[in-house]
Image (cartoon, rainbow, N blue to C red):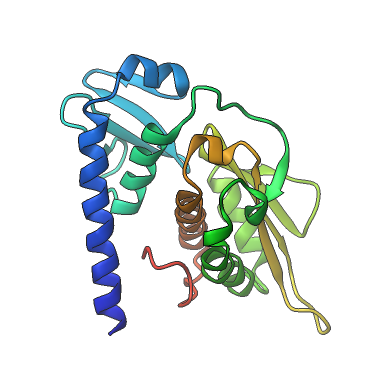
Amino acid sequence: MIEEIQMEETNNYEKWCEQRREKFLKMDQEELKRRLPELKEEENRLTICHFGRKLGVHKEDGRILAMDDQDPVTCYERLNVYTLFGYVSSLAHYKDNWVRFDQLKNTSPFSKAFQEGVVEPFSRMFSGHVKELSYACEKLGGKKLTWSDAGYELKAFECIPVRFLFWDGDDEFPAQGNLLFDASATDFIHGESVVTIAAIGLDRIAKLAGVPMDRSAFPIF
């Protein structure tokens, strides 16, 4: 039953990817580059990095592939890129105002999914694994922060930094993790996509850390 639900969700994401790929083909690509200066032209592709993974979007057919590895680009990664392209406001800019997910604009419908599918699994997964978490974040190019037992700022996209904060547990208190976002995040991308972005970041960290994904994590895996 769980596998059937996950298959249906994947099929829905693939359908949305196709719809947004078609929308990309109608976009003014020069205007898109103005809104997202991190976009670079490389021959017939626009390139962008998603948690350090370089992706290329074909300018004529909109299809996305990885530029530096042979692994397939998941529908969740592709949808994040397409949604970023379709949603970014011409007025979007970094605000240097860090907030919790539920404090971002228009995210309240997705708060439960974020808490149960990202924050709580993150807290459980890295209990007793601070060194592994730090190693993984540093491998991803994370900037170490001065608070929490392991705190790092990673770039989901250049325009959407994410802060992963983790306090390990002890005999009295369980481990606790949290994520912070610049308040501008939902000027660049839809609030629901922020959940997917966080889940992809958690997946990347877990794989590099050698820590198994929590079964209750947001189902992109």
Classify 98 as above or below 31: below
Q: What x and y, as percent, mark residue 215?
A: 45, 77
Residue 73 in view here: yes
Q: What x and y, as percent, mark residue 202?
A: 51, 59
Classify 30 as above or below 167: above
Q: Quadrant of the N terminus?
A: bottom left
Classify 103 as above or below 29: below
Left or right: residue 174 versus residue 115 is right
Kindly indicate the quadrant of the structure image that contains residue 50. top left
Residue closest to the eye, 128 or 162: 162
Kindly indicate the quadrant of the structure image that contains residue 136. bottom right
Q: Quadrant of the C terminus?
A: bottom left
Q: What x and y, as percent, mark residue 72?
A: 25, 50
Left or right: residue 31 versus residue 69 is right
In this view, the residue farthest toward the left is 61
> How many numbered marks appear?
0
Q: What x and y, as percent, mark residue 180?
A: 66, 50
Kindly indicate the quadrant of the structure image that contains residue 159. top right
Residue closest to the eye, 17 or 199: 17
Which residue shows up at 29% across the image and 20% down it? 42
Residue closest to the eye, 68 or 182: 182
Residue 64 in view here: no
Classify 164 as above or below 95: below
Which residue shows up at 30% across the image and 72% down it? 6
Which residue shows up at 60% across the image and 54% down it? 135
Left or right: residue 100 versus residue 5 is right
Which residue shows up at 61% across the image and 60% down it? 133
